[in-house]
Amino acid sequence: MRNPQRRIVGKDLLLVLIYLLKQGGEGDTFPIDMLRSSLTRTFAVALGLSLASPVLADRIQDESLEDLRRVQKTVQSKLEKSMAATVAIVAPKGMGTGVVVDENGLILTAGHVSMAPGQPVDIIFNDGRKAKAITLGRHQLSDAGMMRITKPADEEWDYVEIENEEAISESGEWCYALGHPGGRDEARGMVLRVGRVLEKRRYKVKSSCELMGGDSGGPLFGLNGKVIGIHSFIGGKFTDNYHVSMAPFLAHWDAMVDGDVITTVGRGRGGFLGVGSSNHPDGVIIKQLVKGAAAAKAGLEVGDIISAIDGTPIASYLVFNDHLKLKAPGEKIDLNIIRDDELIEMTIELGERP
Amino acid sequence: MRMILSLKLPFLALFVVLGTTRAASDLPENLQELSKSGSSRVLEIFVDKNVRSVATVISQDGYLVTKGSNLEQDGALVVSVGDRHIQPRVVDVLPEVDLVVLKVPGKDLDHVVWDADSKAAMGDWLVSVGARSREASLGVVSAKTRKIKAMRAALGIQMQPSETEVASEGVTIVRVVPLSPAQRCDLREGDVIKEMDEKEVTNPADVRAIVALSSPGKALQIRIERNGRRIAKEALLEDETILEFASDRSRLLNGRTSTRRVDFPEVIQHDTPLDPKLMGGALLDLDGNFVGINIARVNRFTTYALPVRTFSKALKAIVNQDRSKSRTRRASLLSPAGPLGSAKTQP
């Protein structure tokens, strides 16, 4: 693992997981504790100690058949179009998946599939048609990547829309995944999985659609047929399937199309708020304030409960931390504070980490 | 006809007893009800007191089918029927679809209905019925229904190349592939293989030949020498995908898989995460129709099921033949014209 960059190929998602772990120093975006625990489970499996029951919490027993029928009908009505826009990507370092999002052949994929900008890759559509593409920019922190079909030129490509309203993919929503797990297999074709969105973070979505190496870069769809995620990495449990959210694509669209590699947040050291906090039923409670840092200067007090950040309710300390670390020094955040049972709204400009 | 009704009858009966106003056409409303309606048709199979497989009841007089390679390991077979534990009779095997037909005594057992024309389209929900009242699992048809090619069997060991030494010493293992059949049955580096399936092995070519003649899913009896002691092992062979590059890592993420997961005439691929011990169980659609039998847990995202048409004809033939044989047996035992009676009249 001396040179992780070289070994990350679309074919092996676990490596990405390890890579992210390696990258995860202090202040990394990815929930390192979650990754570590996944890895522990993975090792437990390796040692034959235990394997979680494969019964998924999201596929609950009191699922109404009427609802299931509706989901089935909806997915099947969207499937043809979704599959027509989903492509296999044959890159020099491995196979992955991608999804065409405009008629000019712009493809969203995972950053660890597209890798460096300006590289030629081969594209195979579900009906067997082949095309050439060139890799574009990449958002390193979130694992977002882009490509554009170059040959044949002047073709109008089948494409799907992407979801740009975040509300659609709330936790618990049904979703479906397409891709080429294990690489493209002509006899088998593309593989569908239907599941639920289990968790939503700013830059990533977790779902119960079981992914595998080769799926990397493939699309996760909402039931409206719009792309809500791009397959990125997995953990040891069948429910540990992570997708890049649309947020990094939307935020850096033009730069990525121009072939930029975006490392805005540097090594993941975000802006500094300067609070020590822990979980609270209503969000996180402030236990400590760093003297002279942004929070103290803005008037936050020990005992204040932060219930929302930038309008997003805080489910746990992790969510709060995640959100914070994606912000650069100088960026502003809106906080909802509960102090003495009163709601206070505050806007704070983040400082530099000391 | 009778069988189609049998799925819905328990509910109708219940509603009538309770005197509710539900119409006779009411079907189960949620997954749990649907699963319960099928759960008496799926029975657990124990080998030496451990659940190894589940069987689907295919007739009211007690014919069952399950995944053959799940029962490869030696041991006493017991089927759990209601609250009774019964030793089944092994009727026959269908090696091409990895099914084994069992028989337990029975008169009015709940059983599945065969419709050889049943279809499953990509995106259709499928319900894997839990045995007894265990939870059902849900998934969708996730890829093309297709044939799965045969593959060679693999054990997962590297052997010391045989040189000029005395040949009868056995074959020394120099490496055991992680998560391979060899590792699962506790073969270790340094073990010396003496016998396989009661045949003496003296060089790696012998071992390769025996493995090559076996198929994935088969139990291979192995005698080894470790620290001067003879030990017997039983390896459940798998296919050679276990030897692929980088498969160790990805296999970790697959969870438990079936030993035989290749060589089927046709399978429905679905994304239901199931334990390999649940193979042999019935697969229903949302209307409670029997569409197939789960036959292989393949990897993290794949379970295979046999569509009804892959086994219905052969199974019917086996059951009919066995029934008529049993009738002859009974008749010959009871009637004075049977073997005992007729013996007397022989000159």
Image: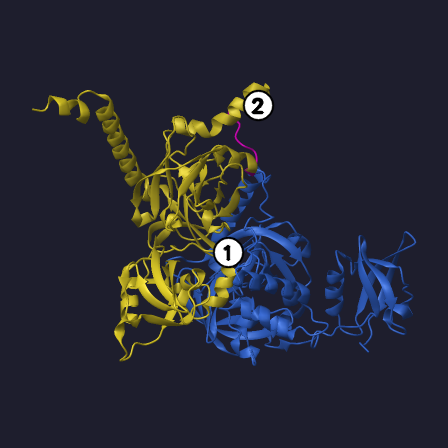
Chain colours: A blue, B yellow
Numbered disc 2: what chain? B
Q: Which residues are magenta?
A: B22-31
> Furthest-left residue in view?
B347
Q: Which mark is residue B83?
A: none
Badge 1 density bin: few <14, some 14–19, many ≥20, Cα 10 Å: many
* Badge 2 amino acid: Arg
In front of the other: B335 or B63: B335
How far is the residue under mark 1 from the one under mark 2? 40 Å
In front of the other: A135 or B340: B340
The answer as to whether the residues below labels 1 and 2 share one chain is: no
Which quadrant would residue A219 be assigned to in this image?
bottom right
**Which quarter shows the N terminus of chain A?**
bottom right
Residue A346 % position (x, y):
87, 62
Q: Does A349 appear above or below B218?
A: below
Q: Magenta stretch mostly in which secondary structure?
A: loop
Q: Does A62 appear above or below A41?
A: above
Residue B338 % position (x, y):
19, 24
Numbered disc 1: what chain? A
Find disc 1 in the rendering and name its residue: A82
SS of the residue at dot 1?
Answer: helix
Find disc 2 in the rendering and name its residue: B22
* Foreground tag (1 vs 2): 2
Whether residue B24 appears in magenta in the rendering, the answer is yes
Residue B125 % position (x, y):
49, 44
Left or right of residue B18, residue B142 in this image: left
In front of the other: A333 or A39: A39
Q: Is residue B123 visible?
A: yes
Which quadrant would residue B156 be assigned to in this image?
bottom left
Residue A220 % position (x, y):
56, 58
Q: Are marks 1 and 2 in contact (CB under 8 Å)?
A: no
